[in-house]
Amino acid sequence: MKISYNWLQDFLKIDLEAEKIGEILTDLGLEVEGIEIFETVKGSLKGIVVGEVLACEQHPNADRLKVTKVDLGDGEPVQIVCGAPNVSVGQKVPIATIGTVLYAKDGANFTIKKGKIRGEESFGMICAEDELGLGKGHDGILVLDKNVKIGTSVAEIFDIKTDSIFEIGLTPNRADAMSHLGVARDLKAGLLQMEKIRKKLITPPVSNFHVDERTFKIKVEVDNTKLVPRYAGITITDIKVEDSPKWLQERLKSIGLKPINNIVDITNYILHGLGQPLHAFDADKIKGDKIIVKNLPSGTKFVTLDGVERSLDEDDIMICDAENNPMCIAGVFGGEDSGVTKKTKTIFLESAYFNPVSIRKTAKRHALNTDASFRFERGIDPEAVVLLLKRAAILISEIAGGKIVSDITDIYPNKIEDFQVHISYERVHKLIGEEISEEIIKNILASLDIKINNQTQSGLGLTIPSYRVDVTREADIVEEILRVYGYNNIKIPQKLNTSVSSFNKISTEKVEDIIANFLVSQGFYETMANSLTKLDYVDKLEMLNKNQNVTMLNALSSDLSVMRQSMLFGGLESVAYNINRKNNSLKFFEFGNTYHKYESGYTEQKHLSLIVSGNLQKNNWNVENQASDFYYLKGIITSLLLRLGISNLRISATKNDIFSEAIAFQLGKNKLVEFGIVKRTILKDLGIKQEVLYADINWDNILQCVGKKDLKVKPLQKYPEVKRDLALLLDKKIKFSDLYDAAFQSERKLLKNVDLFDVYTGDKLPKGKKSYALSFVLQDENKTLNEKQIDKIMSKLQQTYIKQFEAELR
């Protein structure tokens, strides 16, 4: 936001350097990011002085040039060659002296130097008005008044001004400071507390407001006073739409605004100067001489000032005429057919307070960010609506010759009450970390227009001014006190006090860090996908339910319209992005939430997703390429769970339609992980041609398992493991989990592990059959197993499989 120092002085007469003002504003929380110099004429006519033409003769070597002698008031006259047809003896003219920089319209500049023109020396330049930036004329040199003194700076004659422009990085909560008056209010408080300078705030005068005659009134009707708590307007006739006076144009130009005409410029002056957005309607275009503030049906077409036809939403607040024709999107943007033109003679001037949430949603919905919506959606002062309407009407009367022909219409059925807040001195001192005297606290509050209603030994009862919509709590008051008192004035203690707290609960952040570090050590990269995703992703998986979507009310685009129900698609988007850039070997992990809407309400579920694709290692001359596979991912997941002390897992089948082949790990009834190979049909939709392995880890369930049992430490086994294999011919319906459970039921003491290391379903097998190759690990913790014991266990396992599953040994 740009703030003009000269404009600030309309409200606060100060004579400090701009840099000092910038420091005070920054200390107050209005961070000044930079200070620029604005000049009403570029270069401020430095080096341009008044000269008198003493002699003017024809150039001996050029028909269109003349050789002049010019008195600059500093002694000896100088010779200047001039090509202007109107130069003559006795004229007072602007002279660009040697070293002066002139600025062209195209942004280029050139320096006046001593030189020769067609053999005659020239020691300066007699200037036309366009060469000085004072106008467009170039027919001849600019002739000044004969009474001006020779040697006078031309900048003094034309009242050329410079200004310091503060670029303020305003925080969204400070709606009260979105104007020059708002900044001046804060600066007044800062000057008093930080510099002990007491200044009076100059408020806009409205005492001379009066109705000239009551001959034409536009009626107003507001349908929804919740969305439009206050709406005011006035009719002004006999206006003359033309260029604004110089002072008004300079005010707007200084903050980067282009002057348009006197009516529009006045509304912008009130907006940026005093903080109240206004809108002027051509009253002759208001059918039925009536304004209706209402909502229109969704799909209603409306052409805005920029010539764009927009489709309205039923929640948009619209300003309509008596025939329900839309004329303006309230608080956001005007209409193409109802605005002020050069032919306008009568206007209806609107000043209102609109519901901030409604304006914000409308502005987002139509992708419009105007100066008016910027202020309305943050909250303006409802008590200033009529006051500043009067001020604008006075300016229009003075500048555009307007005549006020109606009383002000002010629809304000339910007054917005000022916030009441109670603060305790103890709380103030505790939050600030330092005791501030009660007198200083009261003075700061008074300088901020915060009224003290009652006071006790322990605290104060306060009324917050209507323009401070962000101050509603005790903590907000403390912040106000602190920023005016000065953050830099709070002493840094030399002694640090701390205590060690006892905390038995598992730190979720610490557990995440442990696993993140583990995965990074295994070559994985952490990703962070957007929680917002495409609506059509839900249709790709049967496990996802469109009715459970958490939908955005004001989606930025169709690609970001719903909250994700699965971590899969964000990860696959990262895979596709990398593959398209020739990075084919990928290992990703992501911590994130999924979002669901159930009948009972909204829920968030924490997940950890793993994605592996391509080779395990990058190509290297001394390492053979090895593709990542299911067993690699299984090993990573098993190690990850062991790192958290989670063991004794049960392998189960999964019906998740993400995978073509997959299994799950369970601990008791809790399913911890599902992992496998992603279906090719899903990959194809995202343009991925290589195999992708995916694991979905239910992090909420993982955290429930972490820390449940104390970790047990035991010595390394003295006695060796024994590994034996079985190849079984089985019915296709039999699952590995069934074989796994049956093995441990058969041998609980010495059987340590069962693995499936090969699956065969070729044509050579009988119909409906498959071949499983199982690996069994046996171990006795007290002695070395002998062959007799091993054979007995393996025989028992074989008989179990034959009886329970009709298995055949291969």
Image (cartoon, helix red, strand yellow):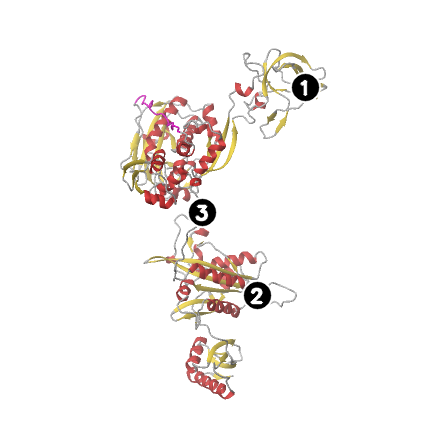
Precedes in sequence: disc 3 or disc 1: 1
In this rendering, is residue 224 above or below 667?
Answer: above
Q: Which residue is mark 1?
A: 122
Precedes in sequence: disc 3 or disc 2: 3
Residue 360: x %, y % from top left: 39, 42
Q: SS of the residue at dot 1? A: strand
Query: Marks 3 and 2: which is nearer the front?
Result: 3
Q: Residue at x 59, y 68 (%)?
A: 626
Residue 314 appears in view: no
* In contact (CB < 8 Å): disc 1 and disc 2: no
Looking at numbered disc 2 in the image, what kind of residue is underneath it?
Answer: Leu
Q: CA distance from mark 1 to mark 2?
A: 80 Å
Residue sticking out furthest to the bottom: 788
* In contact (CB < 8 Å): disc 3 and disc 2: no
Q: Main secondary structure of the magenta part?
A: loop
Q: Nearer the viewer, residue 606 or 30?
A: 30
Q: Quadrant of residue 459?
A: top left
Q: Residues within 10 Å of mark 3 (few under 14, many from 20)?
A: few
Residue 40: x %, y % from top left: 52, 26
- Numbered mark located on residue 616 in the image: 2
Q: Which residue is mark 3?
A: 494
Looking at the image, residue 256 sits to the left or right of residue 324; the answer is right
Looking at the image, residue 211 sits to the left or right of residue 66; the answer is left
Q: Residue at x 68, y 19 (%)?
A: 122
Residue range corresponding to the magenta coloring: 198-213
Q: SS of the residue at dot 3? A: loop
